[in-house]
Amino acid sequence: MLLFRWMASLLLLASALCFVFYLGTGRVLYKRWGLLVFKWTVIAGLAFFAVLIFGRLV
């Protein structure tokens, strides 16, 4: 559980840094990377909570 929290926190931080770089430089590449990292962070979080809910049901 602690590992997942650290991983999610670091992914959100990486996404935020990409957006800050986009604001600073105006390069669309950083915006694209930020959205990609954020999307996969949300997907990983949803999968994690689905496994927790499934574990409670079974």
Image (cartoon, grey):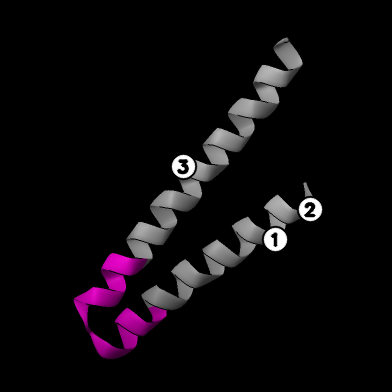
Report which residue position mark 2 lands on.
2
The residue segment tinted magenta is 20-33
x 52%, y 44%: residue: 44
Provide the secondary structure element on which disc 3 rests.
helix
In the image, what residue type sits under mark 3?
A: Ile
In the image, what residue type sits under mark 2?
A: Leu
In the image, what residue type sits under mark 1?
A: Trp
Q: Residues within 10 Å of mark 3 (few under 14, many from 20)?
A: few
Quadrant of the drawing holding the C terminus? top right
Give the percent coordinates (x, y) of residue 14.
50, 71
Report which residue position mark 1 lands on.
6
Marks 1 and 3, how far apart in space? 16 Å
Marks 2 and 1: CB-CB under 8 Å?
Answer: yes
Mark carried by residue 43: 3
Give the percent coordinates (x, y) of residue 43.
46, 42
Task: Specify the farthest residue to the right.
Answer: 2
Provide the secondary structure element on which disc 2 rests.
helix
| Number of numbered tags placed on the structure image | 3
What is the magenta segment's predominant secondary structure? helix
The first of marks 1 and 3 along the sequence is: 1
x 63%, y 62%: residue: 9
